Image (tube, rainbow, N blue to C red):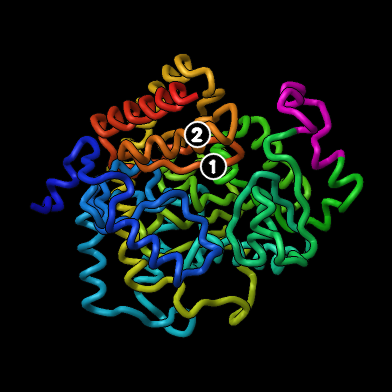
């Protein structure tokens, strides 16, 4: 008998009723491999059919504990009643009208709401379909406003897969291979690295890589339009940079008239226990980017900038579908929930998970580091092979995890996760690590 939404959401741990993957999942995989683009990088054979809160049921009736939130997208959990109600209500009134050409009321309503929660004052927002489109908008705005051509991003970063954003990203060569030439006038520096190692951050007077290499040997600071940074590195491994490094970036931008762009597509919307990860550093960016968790799974991205930067003329940028009214309705409900209690829950449960993972690291020698903020936690392993094996062992036990970086597994569950579900996630993760140790 199928579980109701409430019954599914209230489960504390997985329920597996077939071998993993089950026969229906295998049939989905076989069909998929015949008709979909081979460019899609699937982690493992999981075919979700419905979800409730932190729990997801596959096509075979197996219930999994979702510890990756569909890559940090389902911030309020799967099919949150208030979000689905907002979507249904809006869909019954208006599915679409282009905000690029007409005054869509809910578009400006959401932009006003984003202005209320933005980490800087007096902002304007451009709504897009995704995070990568928000990145593209920021790059265009920065070049247009400053009249400068260069942009700087960091090794290990991921900003999307369209041409501008994939040029800014530098996490995996496969994202660029075969697609060159990339966008011109983009340079890269080591993430969270004053010169060549983290130890240099202990010396406040030591020259930074950007000053010593980029500005001295490649471009003048007066040619740099923007620095695009993830306040917590996402696909690069869930790395939290030292506070001093972030402060140095902000100071450098202020000194040279460079725009600081915070890419919070993955780290924003309450995931780190604050609405924005950059708030942990007490820094105000010039532009902030959001996506993924902003609309609980509906396609939406946002580029929010200080009002005085929005100097581009009418017609210079737009989007047919960006700011779709149904996605905007989902975002408004999502922000209500995150502000109401979920970002507090993210901080609370994040501490519980981090403490449990640190204790686990003491028992498993191949766990080399546990890091992160709130419900954006990374567990580093001694090799990518071990990370692969732990991810697979957790999946076989009913927990959905996903790798990030060179050899890390991210733990980024929906912000609605409770203590019992977190405890179950830790137990399964520990069992997966033990199974890998036993197999070795």
**Residue closest to the far left:** 1
Numbered tag placed on residue 404 in the rendering: 1
Nearer to me, 415 or 60: 60
Q: Which residue is mark 2?
A: 378
Q: Report if the CB atoms under discs 1 and 2 are less than 8 Å apart.
A: yes
Image x and y of residue 31, in percent: 38, 67
> As drawn, is 69 to the left or to the right of 201?
left
For residue 11, above or below residue 169: above
Residue stretch in magenta: 194-212
* Dot 1 or dot 2, earlier in sequence: 2
SS category of the residue bearing label 1 = strand
CA neighbours of label 1 inside 10 A, class few (<14), some (14 to 19), many (20+): many
Q: Position of residue 366 (x, y in %)?
A: 54, 22
Check if residue 112 falls in the magenta segment.
no
Residue count near mark 2 (Cα–Cα under 10 Å), binned few <14, some 14–19, many ≥20? many
Q: Secondary structure at mark 2?
A: strand
Residue 198 magenta-drawn?
yes
> Could you tell whether 80 is left or right of 350 in the image?
left
Q: Residue at x 53, y 65 (%)?
A: 38
Please state if 233 lies on the left or on the right of 206 as rendered: left
Foreground of the two, 164 or 105: 164
- The residue located at (35%, 80%) in the rendering is 96
């Amino acid at each position: 008998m199928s579980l109701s939404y409430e019954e599914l959401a209230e489960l504390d741990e997985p329920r597996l009723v077939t071998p993993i993957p089950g026969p229906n999942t295998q049939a989905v995989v076989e069909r998929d491999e015949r008709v979909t683009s081979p460019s899609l990088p699937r982690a493992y054979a999981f075919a979700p059919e419905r979800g409730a809160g932190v729990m997801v049921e596959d096509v075979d009736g197996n219930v999994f504990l979702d510890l990756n939130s569909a890559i940090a997208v389902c911030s309020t959990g799967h099919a949150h009643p208030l979000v689905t109600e907002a979507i249904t209500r809006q869909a019954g009134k208006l599915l679409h009208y282009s905000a690029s050409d007409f005054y869509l009321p809910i578009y400006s309503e959401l932009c006003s709401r984003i202005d209320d929660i933005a980490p800087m004052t007096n902002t304007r927002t451009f709504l897009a379909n995704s995070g990568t489109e928000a990145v593209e908008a920021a790059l265009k705005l920065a070049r247009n406003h400053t009249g400068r051509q260069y942009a700087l991003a960091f090794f290990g970063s991921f900003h999307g897969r369209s041409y501008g954003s994939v040029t800014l990203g530098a996490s995996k060569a496969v994202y660029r291979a075969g697609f060159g030439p990339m966008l011109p006038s983009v340079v890269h520096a080591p993430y969270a690295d004053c010169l060549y190692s983290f130890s240099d951050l202990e010396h406040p007077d030591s020259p930074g890589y950007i000053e010593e290499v980029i500005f001295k040997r490649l471009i003048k600071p007066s040619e740099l339009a923007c620095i695009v940074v993830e306040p917590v590195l996402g696909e690069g491994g869930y790395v939290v940079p030292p506070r001093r490094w972030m402060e140095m970036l902000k100071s450098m931008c202020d000194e040279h008239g460079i725009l600081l762009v915070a890419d919070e597509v993955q780290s924003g919307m309450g995931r780190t226990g604050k609405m924005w990860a950059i708030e942990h550093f007490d820094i105000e960016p010039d532009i902030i980017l959001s996506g993924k968790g902003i609309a609980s799974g509906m396609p939406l991205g946002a580029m929010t900038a200080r009002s005085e930067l929005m100097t581009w003329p009418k017609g210079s940028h737009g989007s047919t579908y960006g700011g779709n009214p149904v996605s905007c309705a989902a975002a408004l409900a999502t922000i209500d929930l995150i502000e109401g209690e979920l970002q507090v829950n993210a901080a609370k449960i994040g501490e519980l998970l981090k403490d449990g993972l640190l204790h686990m690291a003491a028992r498993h020698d191949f766990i080399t580091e546990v890091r992160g903020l709130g419900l954006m936690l990374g567990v580093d392993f001694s090799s990518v092979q071990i990370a692969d094996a732990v991810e697979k062992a957790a999946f076989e036990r009913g927990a959905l995890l996903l790798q990030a970086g060179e050899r890390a597994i991210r733990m980024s569950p929906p912000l609605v996760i409770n203590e019992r579900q977190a405890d179950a996630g830790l137990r399964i993760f520990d069992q997966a690590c033990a199974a890998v140790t036993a197999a070795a």
